[in-house]
Amino acid sequence: MKKYNVSIFVPHEGCPNNCSFCNQKSISGKTTLPMEKDVVSACEIAIKTAPSNQGEIAFFGGSFTAIEREYMMRLLKSAYPFVKEGFFKGIRISTRPDCIDEEICHILKNYGVTSVELGCQSMDDEVLRMNLRGHTSRDVEKAVEILKSFGFETGLQMMTGLYGSDYEKDIKTAEKIIFLKPHTVRIYPTVVLENTLLEIKYKAGEYKVMSLEETIKLCAKLLVMFEENNINVIRTGLHSGGNVEEGFVAGAYHPAFKELCESEIYLEKILTEIKNIPPCEIEFSVPTGALSQAIGQKKKNKIWLEEKGYKVKFTEDKSLKKYTVKCCAGK
Ligand code: SF4
């Protein structure tokens, strides 16, 4: 049965922070705050469109537990009956690591929240400081510990290429995230938006953005790291649409970003397989469902191999694990 998720964007207009990459202040007032009736009608539409008890009601926007408490309660109270009645499996929220404590976890638990995602962005304290995050890596560790003790499905969001970061620091962040064993991860390459500190730094030449190519290589590596540690990556790259394309100044943004990263993974695996095989007719098996990623966008990987003299054929093999390649024949 098709599951239907309800997504409700909760802008954080009163946020006291001023993160380097966030344009919340400049867009505040242009987005309307959802009210109880909006939550109810979104849930009712979902139930009519695709009845299922496997969907989630998601309040996203970054800092759910930091919004005004009375307003947060009103949103939860309007969503909770739909969970209690069994129309949805739970409520998902995202928030800041320093806005999680036992008291808030009790509230979330009592109102049907089952998944909490934290924007940790980096586990390097200097990078967090330079990007004015207002929390430390220790806050992330403490929050994860509390969330897990309450039994929440715990997700961590990281950003790559932040001001003051680099390839090695982003890999270290992923290693520290893996150590915390979250259930899910989201990877967001940094994008410079209008009216942000990053825009000022970028235009002043103090911040150099990571190129799309470098970011694809980095995120390909991160995807493999998380996969090898059984951590589900539920998002790679920013969503297309919204205010990203509108206020875009610079950065590694591509609407099919994840596909590009996965193609890079398969190309690297293929290169390892053919390291000692001279140009020949060759067949590669890839996991079922991964053909287009293995062949590459606009057949990039296939063309590249053909230019090197390989006559390649790709087949699917359902016994293969994600991101693995088997070289089946070489003549
Ligand atoms: S990203 Fe930072 S500034 Fe923007 S809403 Fe979240 S905490 Fe506030």
Image (tube, rainbow, N blue to C red):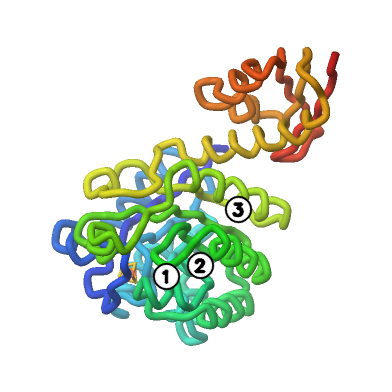
Check disc 1 and report the residue beneath it: 95
Residue occupying image coordinates x 62% and y 20%: 302
> How far across and down, in percent of the image, does residue 319 sit?
81, 33
Q: Secondary structure at mark 3?
A: helix
Check disc 2 and report the residue beneath it: 116
Image region (quadrant) for ligand 1? bottom left
Taking 48 as reference, is 20 left or right?
left
Q: What is the count of numbered marks?
A: 3
Residue occupying image coordinates x 65% and y 16%: 306
Q: CA distance from mark 3 to mark 2?
A: 22 Å
Q: Quadrant of residue 133?
A: bottom left
Mark 2 beta carbon near ligand 1 (under 8 Å): no
Q: CA distance from mark 2 to mark 1?
A: 7 Å
Q: Earlier in the sequence, mark 1 or mark 3?
A: 1
Name the image quarter holding the N terminus.
Answer: top right
Q: Are marks 2 and 1 in contact (CB under 8 Å)?
A: yes
Label 2 neighbourhood size at 10 Å, few (<14), some (14-19), many (20+)? many
Q: Are marks 1 and 3 in contact (CB under 8 Å)?
A: no
